[in-house]
Image (cartoon, rainbow, N blue to C red):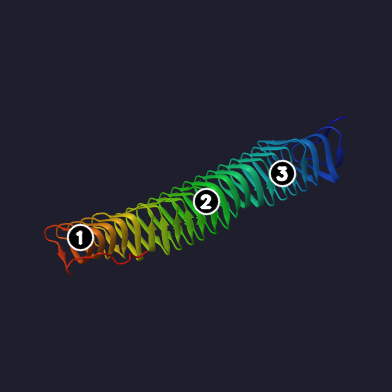
Amino acid sequence: MTDTQVPRGSRIRLGRVDGDLRVERGASIDVEGRLIVSGEARFEGNAEILGDLECRDFSNEDGTVRISGDLTVQQALRADDGSLVVGGSLSAERVDIDRELHVKGPARAREFDIGGALDGEATLTAEKVSVGGRLRIAGKLEARSVEAGGAVEISEASLDRLEVGGLAHLGGGEVRESIEVGGRFVAESSFKFGSLEVGGLAEFRGDGTGGSIDVGGVLTARGNLSFSKLEVGGIGTIGGTAKGESVDVGGKFDVRGPLELARSLEVGGAVSVGESVTGDRLEVGGSLEARRAVFQGSAEIGGAVRTRDGLKAASIELHRKSHAIGPLVGGRVEIGRMSRAEDVYGSTVEVGPKSRAGRIFAERIRLGENAEVDEVQYTVELRAEEGVRIRSPPQQVSRLPPFPL
């Protein structure tokens, strides 16, 4: 068994090679049927294979090898300071290329390690994919883990883990465990995920279903979004229904449909919900606007609350100079100093000094200095400090009217 050498700049015709094949720079091979190399196919510099190639090992150094047909490598495929272009399908045990890999047909290997760019026009199947620069797969990408230093564009993902330094643009699919993106994340259609961490912007253009979400900048979801824990440093917008355990947003949070939470809603700025919002605990630094808001535990409002049907919680606290439009219904309701509220229902209601309220219905009521109230009904106790004004005479009743919500 002897090696076969293709001289520099030559063009020959081959069908089968018993042993190794060495191709020098600038050579071109016309394939008779299918070129089968029992040993290693080694390329030095740029070269061209016009047809299909099958070999035990494949290596290329300092150049680009172009194969017009299919490439089948039984073991290792590597390109030192080189690139590879495959016009058909690609199959290998391991692919290690310093520069770029371009494949038009389906690609399969246990591991892809590409220093520059990986561009696939069809499907790609692997256990691990690592790309230093850009990754683009026009078909489905199936793998356990994918890492890319630059940008990733995948038509359909079926992955366990995805880690991207810059932009991740996914047509749809699923990442079962975790996604980490340094810059921007986009999912074009319905998408499932385990956890999502994005440094900048995250956008769901279809429905999203998954676990925890942590976005440093802006989150946008055009459809419905389900999650466990949602944290957004800046602004969050959801066009449909939002459902999860908890939400923590540093700036502004808008939900067009209902917002259903098992635990807490914490927003530093303003919250706007088109339908109802439910949860266990509410803490808003700015304002809350919703059709109705029902919380099993506490609700704290730093600025304003606006509801049509009302806000209900075990305890409600309006901070100093706050404003409530819509009924407040709670076990204990505290209206801070110089605040305003409409109707208030509770077991214990405290109205701070220089505050203004509409009607109050409670077992025990305390009105601070210079507070103003339209109407008071109580069953146990009414305490009013100096300067309090009640427009209608207070009524002690045996039974309070039914509370809203």
**Residue that lies at the very extreme toward the bottom in this rendered image:** 392
Location of the C terminus (image quadrant): bottom left
User: In the rendered image, is residue 115 in sight?
Assistant: yes
Label 2: which residue?
A: 185
Amino acid at circle 3: Arg
Along the line of sight, which residue is nearer the eye, 91 or 315? 315
Pick whichever of labels 1 and 2 is earlier in the sequence: 2
Task: Say whether residue 219 is left or right of residue 170.
Answer: left
In the image, residue 154 lies at what x, y percent? Answer: 61, 51
Residue drawn at point x = 31 percent, y = 64 percent? 327
Dot 1 amino acid type: Ser
| Percent of width and height locating residue 255 | 44, 60
Left or right position of 143 against 184: right
| Secondary structure under the numbered disc 2 in the rendered image | strand
Give the spatial CA distance, label 3 vs label 2: 26 Å
**Which corner quadrant holds the N terminus?**
top right
Circle 1: element type:
loop
Whether residue 72 sits left or right of residue 266 in the image: it is: right
- 94 up-or-down from 247: above or below: above
